[in-house]
Amino acid sequence: MRWLSRFLAAAVLICLLVPGLAPARSRRRRPAASPQFSYYLLVLSDAPDFCDQSPGSKDPLECGAGRRVGFVVHGLWPQAETARGPESCGPASPVSQAIVQATLRYIPTESLIQHEWAAHGTCSGLSAADYFAALRKARDAVTLPADLNQPSQKMQFSPAQIESKLAAANPRFPKTAFRTSCYRDGELQEIRVCLNKDLTPRACGPSAGECTAATVTLLPVR
């Protein structure tokens, strides 16, 4: 029976070496692990100050005269507790036009919508439809004081004053759920809102950042 043992051994070796004959179990791929993050940052960019920055061309949908755009959603960013969160976590198919159209009221340009999905949405563990639905829901839950969102003249506040105004307008949020970010010239860059993974408000972690300028400038809407 020695010949039979040799025949069986050869058959097993062929199955292992030829991909098409390999056992099904050996061809299975383990599912990719879900990206790890602690919470979300809802990032609201101040359009007048962004449009004032140079160099670089600015999209007229956001920066065109007469548009009167205040804050726009920059993104919903998965964030680590004490460090920046993951980015660009996998291949990103283009976001469908149905999702784009539903989101343009929040993010004014399609290019930014596509960028945010590739850079941050792919790290959420959600589908594109669910990620942008979460982004819209998160933005709808935040009230921006009118003097911040639609200023008619140049104004200056300390970062603490801006955060206090936001906390007063959103009493369901912890006072520490809001952070400011500023450009080097002291103009306001972003308002950042900290949310749990289920989009309930929470206190910001160290990774949310903070503007360290004594005063921050807000430019009027165009």
Image (cartoon, grey):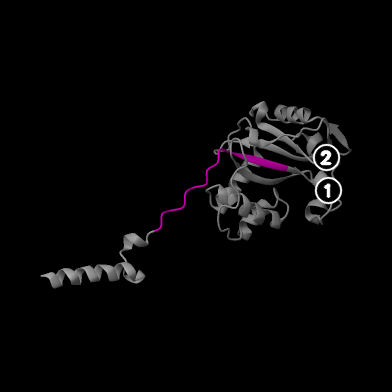
Residue 217 percent location from the top left of the image: 84, 36
State the predominant SS element of the stretch in magenta: loop
Instruction: Name the residue tied to disc 2.
Output: 187
> Decide: marks 1, 2 in contact (CB < 8 A)?
yes
Residue kind at label 1, given as amino acid type: Gln
Q: In the figure, 6 relative to 55: above or below? A: below
Residue 1 percent location from the top left of the image: 10, 70
* Residue 39 part of the magenta-drawn span: yes
Q: In the figure, 65 relative to 1: above or below? A: above
Q: In the figure, 102 relative to 171: above or below? A: below
Residue kind at label 2, given as amino acid type: Glu
Q: Residue at x 56, y 58 (%)?
A: 91
Q: In terms of depth relative to the viewer, which is nearer, 217 or 142?
A: 217
Q: Residues within 10 Å of mark 2 (few under 14, many from 20)?
A: many
Q: Is residue 162 left or right of residue 16?
A: right
Residue 140 tag number: none
Q: In terms of depth relative to the viewer, which is nearer, 97 or 11?
A: 11
Secondary element at image label 1: loop
Residue lying at the far right of the rendered structure: 153
Instruction: Name the residue tied to disc 1.
Output: 53
Q: In the figure, 145 relative to 33: above or below? A: above
Q: In terms of depth relative to the viewer, which is nearer, 4 or 85?
A: 4
Magenta residues (range): 29-44
Secondary element at image label 2: loop
Residue 28 percent location from the top left of the image: 37, 59
Q: Residue at x 32, y 59 (%)?
A: 25
The mark nearer the N terminus, 1 or 2, is 1
